[in-house]
Amino acid sequence: MNSTRPCAWRSPPGTACAVSPLLALLLAAGGAQAQVTLGGTLDVATRHVDNGSLGSMNSVVSGANTTSKLVIRGQENLGAGLSAGFYLDGTILADSGTSNTPFWDRRATVSLAHQRFGELRMGRDWVPSQLTWNALDPFATLGIAGANTFRTPFGSRAMGQAFGATATAAAQNPTLRVANAVEFILPAGLAGFNGALIATAGEGGSAGAGQTKGDGFRVGWTQGAWQLGASQFTVRNAAGDDDFSDRVWGLAYDAGFAKLSFGQRRWNYRSDTTTNSLVGLTVPLGAGQFKFSYLRADQTGATAALSANDATLLGVGYVHSLSKRTALYAHAARLSNQGGASFAIAGGPATSGLSTAANYFGGQRSTGFELGMRQDF
């Protein structure tokens, strides 16, 4: 890119300046008080996963260290501390060149914010519990070692009973993001405190298919090396119109030479509960970072057999920054199931939790390794 050529709009360092003529016209139309930026990430890795007696599989995957994504956002200064904005964030499946459905699956919101009174936001956004959980995990819940390995209706009985153990429920259940949301977010400058309230309109659909009727909150406090947080999101239209609760709490301490985090995430539906306990460690090493995490899923149900279906996940990784935009990384993980638990690392041979299935995986071990490259733009 020619360094003497200015961008068509004001943007922070690292934002792309080369856009299509149509997009350039749209961005230039914002006026002197408006700002629109285009950015994102491409992250691709090779992965090997071994699923015990079911064999192993090699694959190329997207977003193992940072989600591959395209982000377009804008903000307009309305004066007197007031601003309006929009945010569009969509997953790019960089290994295949395709995208998720919906296209802006990560976030699609408009907002009105005031420096003193906070922000009102509407659209599709993250659930508060996932934001708190993500901040505690050294792997940001991504890749083979990420804490979202246990966030599946095929393994967590509480999630499966609430939303259905289907591919649609795995992609759309409201433990990651929700549509049709209205949020209020506290302003900055509250002595380290932060927080938000959220409510979503089900609009007559199924929570397992992404039409969630729910409400929740997030509170946190950051001061010096300490970071504390708690959040909850309750789905009011889970199966049978019963409530499904998703609660997270945790704390982190950054000593400079290392950051240690601990937290718990609890999913509850009727008599079924999955409690995820996380211990994380991040150590800076020159231009890189060493990461370690221990995650345990404890399940309880109506019988002793259901309560014995637990699992543990050990993850290690190293990320080496070649520049502010580019990094190489390596992750390794081992998942061990107990009882009839059938969790598995993503990217391996297909598994099943049904004891009569040919690919039954209950009580077995899943291991994985991945090497990748990430570049921000």
Image (cartoon, grey):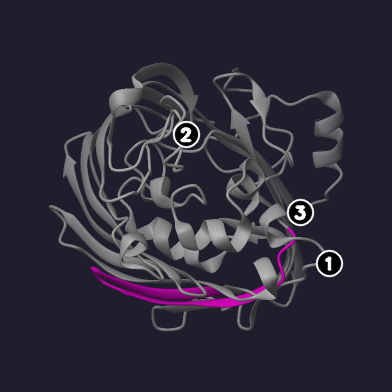
Residue 237 seen from this side:
no
Residue that numbered label 1 is attached to: 203
Under mark 1, the amino acid is Glu
- Sequence-first disc among 2 and 3: 3
Q: Nearer the viewer, residue 277 or 73?
A: 277
**Residue 168 placement (x, y as % from top left):** 66, 45
Measuring 23% from the left and 68% from the top, which residue is drawn there?
225
Q: Nearer the viewer, residue 248 or 366?
A: 366
Local SS, label 1 = loop
Task: Kindly identify which numbered label has been placed on residue 34.
Answer: 3
Q: Is residue 101 above or below residue 132?
A: above
Q: Is residue 341 above or below residue 109?
A: above
Residue 333: % across, % down? 26, 36
Amino acid type at mark 2: Ala
Q: Earlier in the sequence, mark 1 or mark 3?
A: 3
Q: Which mark is residue 357?
A: 2
Q: Residues within 10 Å of mark 3 (few under 14, many from 20)?
A: some
- Magenta residues span 211-233
Q: Residue at x 50, y 38 (%)?
A: 67
Q: Amino acid at mark 3?
A: Ala
* The quadrant where residue 34 appears: bottom right
Q: Nearer the viewer, mark 1 or mark 3?
A: 1
> What is the distance, in whole Å, between disc 2 and disc 3 at their CAs?
58 Å
Percent position of residue 127, x then y = 57, 64
Query: In the picture, which quadrant includes the C terminus?
Result: top right
